[in-house]
Image (cartoon, rainbow, N blue to C red):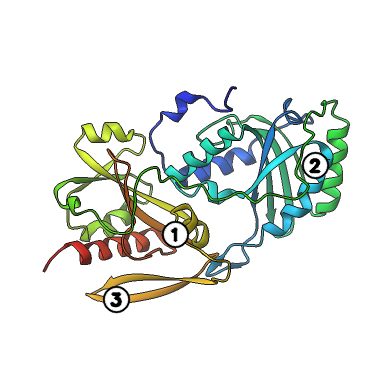
Amino acid sequence: MKRFISLALLLMGSYNVIAQQDELYTRLESLNVQPTFPENLLKTRTVILYRVSPKRRSPSIRGDWKVLTNKIQPTLKKSGIDAVLHYYLEDLLSGTEAYKSFLDYFDDRDVKNAVFVSELDGNYTITIAELQDRQYLLKDGQEAWQIQGTDLENMLNNIYRAIANSGLEKENMLILETAELGEMISPIKAKRNEFYDLNFSSEKLAVPIHPDSAEIRLALDNYPYKWGFVDASIPEKDLRIQGYQYVLYYVNTIGKSAKQILEYKTTDVETSYISEMMVNGKLAVESYNVNTPVYKFYIKHIYSGNIFLGKRWDAAPSKGGALKNYVANLSNELVKN
């Protein structure tokens, strides 16, 4: 069974997640909108991907996107679209390793299409497109069907009528009655460690270059061992040839999703998470809402695939702040004064 994305692209190295998000959003805004739907829309499976206005902007708290899922699923079922999973888009785009794990999962579920649901200050855009690109989901300028408006119920009725009149033959019969919220997919394939590797001291850490590498460099000023910037497109196996044994990664999404992706235990009753970091040799804490976007760094041993999260949850809303926390906790743990 063919996958929706070329396996050749699977062999590509990591790429900057922020640039990836920006490019995907650009492609969503520059689609070649057509009155026709993907030919296989009613024959294959579809993922529903959401973006909504934040509940609060400062500090940022993600808006309630889940309320939309049960409004949209009945229309998709009635139309013959086999919507098997509903996700918040930024959870997919949360990190280099996480993103590839999500796409592998979509391949396993034979997901071929996506419905993008966007809400911005009461204005809705619903886009239906075939998934054609592994790095950005969509090809630049690819064809897609799209509808915009402020009346979601009317838009959903229009979607049903458009599909009913499209001439597509409905082959999807066993479609879910209610929306299935997709689970967070972990990129961890080997050992998960809530501590640091003592071998950090004798090996060099690879740090993929980002547009904000000045912020990263500043946060790494206190990293006690050898490290170096590397091109983000270089495959891990080639980093080892260049003398690197470890690589620095992060997850960037709301705190609850970040914890689930990294296999921390979470409960539905938690409303905030405490981040711990060492400041001038003393423990300091910050509290963040579970729906506030944060960064959480970790180091991966390239050869074994083992990851090292550290002993403390030290996520923060800014990339530099989160890396500073991780490095401070690592230095406090490993460097003996």
For the residues marked 2 and 1, what is the alpha-carbon distance in whole angstroms? Answer: 34 Å
Q: Of marks 2 and 1, which one's residue comes earlier in the chain?
A: 2
**Amino acid at pointer 1:** Tyr
Mark 1 / mark 3, whichever is N-terminal: 1
Q: Would residue 33 appear left or right of 334 to someone viewing this image?
A: right
* Residue 46 in the image, given as x and y percentages of width and height: 68, 37
Provide the residue designation for mark 1.
264
Q: Reply above or below: 21 against 53.
A: above
* Residue 326 as seen in the image, left or right of residue 317: left
Q: Which residue is mark 3?
A: 283
Residue 224 percent coordinates (x, y) = 17, 58
Q: Nearer the viewer, residue 300 or 30?
A: 300
In space, the residues marked 1 and 3 are separated at their CA atoms by 21 Å
Label at residue 77: 2
Query: To which quarter of the image does residue 139 belong?
Result: top right
Tell me which amino acid carries mark 3.
Answer: Leu
How far apart marks 3 and 2 lie (CA) works out to 52 Å
The location of residue 205, given as percent across then percent down, is: 23, 46
Q: Earlier in the sequence, mark 3 or mark 2?
A: 2
User: Mark 2: which amino acid?
Assistant: Lys
Q: Could you tell me which residue is drawn at 32 percent across and 42 percent down?
A: 305
Quarter of the image containing the N terminus?
top right
In the shown orientation, is residue 223 left or right of residue 271? left
